[in-house]
Every structure is written in structure tokens, then in C-alpha cells.
Amino acid sequence: MHLHTSRRWRAAAAGIAAFALVLVGCSPDDSFSYTPPEQVDQALPEDMTAQLQAAVEHAMVKTGSTGAIVGVWVPWSGTWVTGLGTQSVEDQTEVSTDMTFRIADTTRMMTCDVLYGLADEGEVALDASIAEYASGVPQLEEVTLLDLCNGSSGLASSEGTVRGMWLNTPAREWGPLELASFGIGKKQLEPGTAFRDSDSGYLLLGLALERITGKSASQLISEYVTEPLDLVGTSLPGPTAAPPAEGNSLAGNYLPKIEGGYDCTAPVDITTLSSSTGFTDSGAVSTIDDLGRYVQATASQALREGAEPDRFGSPLPVSEKSPSWYQAAGGAYLVGPLIGQRGWTPGYMSAAYSDPTTGFTVAVVLNNSTAGGSVPAYLAWELAAIASKAPAAEGQTAPEFGLPFTAEQYHQNIADLSICATPPAAE
């Protein structure tokens, strides 16, 4: 079956699937079936959820976050999905698990989903030059679309230059090439030789995908990602400034700078924002169940039906100093057996990872972006290390599954990155 046609069929069929993460999308002759490991339908043990909650609350204190939403799915043992804290210092509304939030750099994985989908359909070559599809960048002729997806374009990031503008003018609508230009203008490394965390690359990739298809990035992510996976709470919004979802968004905040650090007592609300600040790098929104469902499906490359090349088959070290188990490929990070993403966007820090073999999945969002993208990664890894030791439920067998790090390591790393000593006080 043509993959494009199969997607449309799956979009209709997937509507009955719950977050048991059993997604079955079939052609009339049942030529397609994605069935992840069955998820035990019970809560994780109380002593384990107490450890998980303590880890999230510790990160909330250290980052000045008033709220968090977290999901942990251990197929052989149980689940823990909860909202913690409140919307803000002033708004004491309790955080709930159905709230929508910005998923930051997990958007990169979705952008690569679209690229691979188009390539699998023969609409574009992975090794096509970005210069074919983006005007004004002839110096990038040696940079391929796959380089942009893999983070091996050599391009620098725009984030450090424009962060202040994002926070001060959240309603401003950015053009993708305009925003990417701040990174393009910096010194470029040799393409294809090393990983470099670059928002500019994913902005250019999104622009190229739009020009290849004549469709908007929002349409493409809907067609290639959210519809086939039945992610009803997930989208790449249009550029007009708005909350992540009308009526039920997790409030997003950042801390104002003061001499010697940040004012942790007075977070600034930035829930309403133009998604163009992130576009196809970090502009998408989702819910915790959708985010977990998405990262599990993408880690196992479910949308590609075994197509070649293997999206995560040739990873690059994240840096010369990073441990051997920390690599990058396909718009994602490979963390031991886990595949996923982490990052920040104004108002939010988030991370989501899944093991493609067992379906073990963690996802988390904190509602203050000031500490940056490392903290949500460390928190997700801490949660994963705790939950990886979950005992098998009755009638289940725990797989051989382990991680190359401990919860204590990343608990300490979060403490070392602390920007707040105590949680913001409620008025």
C-alpha cells in the first residue's frame, strides 16, 4: 500500500485507541499493524510513585516552577500520570493532566517525521541540498535535508541571540528564514561531520518541507504525524499569538532577572505566545498522554513500516565530552536504550523518551522555562532510572531493561543547576 494512503486509513482507525499505546491502523487486507507491548492497566507501586513525585517536586523547587505534568508508562508494571502544583504564584488553580502545553524541541522529531514520510513516498531525496528549497542560502549548498534533521548541518543556533526578543515581544510573528538567519550568520562547522544543537537547522528544514509540498508546516504535521497517530490534542498552531489551547492550557512562566540571579518570587506569565518563535523547531503543543503516545510510536519508527534507511541507525556523539551512551540522530537524542527529545520554549521546559523495544516511556513538562533545556532532560532521566526498577505486575515478566546512569546522578545535576532555593510563595 502507498504510505500516504495508509496514513489516512490509520487516522480513521486509530480513533478507538486509548493510551494503552496500542495503535492499530489497518488497510482493508490488514497489511499494517502496529502493536506495542501491552500496558499493564494499574498504578505503579506507591513507594515508587512517591519517589517519582519527590523527584518532580525537587525539580520544581530548583527551577521556580509552580506546576508540572508527568507521565511514566512501564508496560510490565503500571503507570503514573499526574499533575502537580498550581498554574502560577497568583493563580492557584491546580494543574491537571488534560492541560495542553508547548512541547519545545520534541517538535524537531515531528519535523523529521514529515521529511522521512515524504522521502518514503519518493517526493524528496534525503540527500537533497537545502539550497534547492530555501532562497538566499547558496553558501549552504553542501548541507542536505538529512543533515538538517540529524543536527549535522554545522549551523549554529539562533536561540542565544533572540531569547530576549521572544520574552519581551511574545506576540511577534517571525518568518522562519528571518529567525534562522541569526544562526546562519554565525561560524558554520563542516557539514556532516558532527552533531551541533541548532534550531536554525530545523527552521530551515520546515521551510523546505513547505516549499516541496506547497502545504503549511501545520498541515504537514497534521497529515504525517497527528492524524495517523490519533493525537487529538497535538498540533503546530498558526503564528497568531495564543495560549497552547483555548480554555485549558498549562500556564507558562519565566523568571525576571535581578542582580545576582532571578526573582523567584515573581514569575512572568508568557502563556500567550506566537508559535512562530519555534515553528518546526519548537512550536508544537500537546498533552501529556499525546506526548507519551507520540514518543513511543516514533521511537519505534511505527510510521515508517520498516522503511529504510533506519532513522536512528547512524547516530553521532552529542559532544566530544558526552558519554558514549548519549548520541543524536533523526531529530532525537539516544540516551542508552531510550529515544526522545528535551528542550525549552518560552514558558515551558519538557522532555519525553521511550525505549523502542519494551515501550517504557517517560514524559514531563515544567511550567517555567528559565533554567533551559538540560533540566527537563535530567529530570526525565531521573524518572526513568527510578521507574526502570518497577517490579513486574502479577502475571507479567520484567524484561532485561536497564539504564547506564542512576537517579542519584541526575538528581544532583538538577540541584547543581538550581536557580531558586525555595518555591515561589503563594500570595
Image: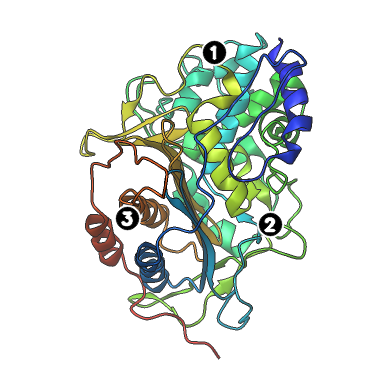
Image coloring type:
rainbow
Residue, disc 1: 307
Residue 243 visible? The answer is yes
* Alpha carbon distance from label 3 to label 2: 30 Å
Residue, disc 2: 244
Using residue 42 as the reference point, say whether residue 18 is left or right of it. right
* Alpha carbon distance from label 2 to label 1: 33 Å
Using residue 108 as the reference point, say whether residue 93 is left or right of it. right
Query: Horizontal and vertical percent for residue 77?
Result: 42, 49
> Are the residues flagged by discs 2 and 1 in contact, CB closer than 8 Å?
no
Badge 2 crowding class, 10 Å Cα cut-off, few under 14, some 14 to 19, many 20 or more, is many
N-term mark: 3 or 2? 2
Question: In the image, what residue occupies the spot 64% across and 78% down?
Answer: 93
Query: Horizontal and vertical percent for residue 407?
Result: 27, 56
Taking depth in this image into account, of 229 and 207 the one nearest to the observer is 229
Residue, disc 3: 386
424 to 211, vertically: above or below: below
Badge 3 crowding class, 10 Å Cα cut-off, few under 14, some 14 to 19, many 20 or more, is some
Front position among marks 3 and 1: 3
Residue farthest to the bottom, as pictured: 427
Query: Horizontal and vertical percent for residue 196?
Result: 37, 34
Query: Helix or strand or loop: what does disc 3 sit on?
Result: helix
